[in-house]
Amino acid sequence: MASRSILVVDDESPVCELMRVTLQRAGHQVECVGDGCQASQTMRRSQFDVLITDLLMPERDGIELIREARREYPRMRIIAISG
């Protein structure tokens, strides 16, 4: 499997940390942020192959973030999660 650059967005830090460790062990580059606003800023700074986002978060929810990602980064793959 090819290494991917992955952005994980979740307001629960244990969830982010678990995904970061798991995905890094699988050989991927992972960055974690805590909300949709931080994710938007991070996506402008770096290019990601995959976005994994929680749907329910403070500040800016995952649905808004997914809409932005689809519009601005149409080749990025998106995985939505919810606890």
Image (tube, grey):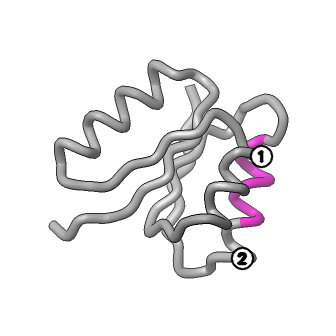
| Residue 41 falls left or right of residue 26 | right
Q: Secondary structure at mark 2?
A: helix
Q: Secondary structure at mark 1?
A: helix
Q: How many numbered markers are drawn?
A: 2
Between 66 and 16, the one lying in front of the other is 16
Q: Spatial distance from mark 2 to mark 1, Cα to Cα?
A: 15 Å
Where is residue 66 shown, x and y percent of the image? 69, 59
Tell me: residue 29, above or below residue 9: below
Where is residue 68 shown, x and y percent of the image? 76, 65
What residue is rendered at 70% in x and 45% in y?
38
Marks 2 and 1 close (CB-CB < 8 Å): no
Tell me the quarter of the image containing the C terminus. Answer: top right
Amino acid type of the residue tagged 2 in the rendering: Glu
Where is residue 79 shown, x and y percent of the image? 50, 54
What residue is rendered at 71% in x and 56% in y?
41
Residue bearing the label numbered 2: 72
Q: Which residues are magenta?
A: 61-68
What residue is rendered at 52% in x and 70% in y?
47
Tell me the quarter of the image containing the N terminus. Answer: bottom left
Write down the quadrant of residue 71 in the picture: bottom right
Residue bearing the label numbered 1: 37
Write down the quadrant of residue 49 in the picture: bottom left
Where is residue 60 shown, x and y percent of the image? 81, 41
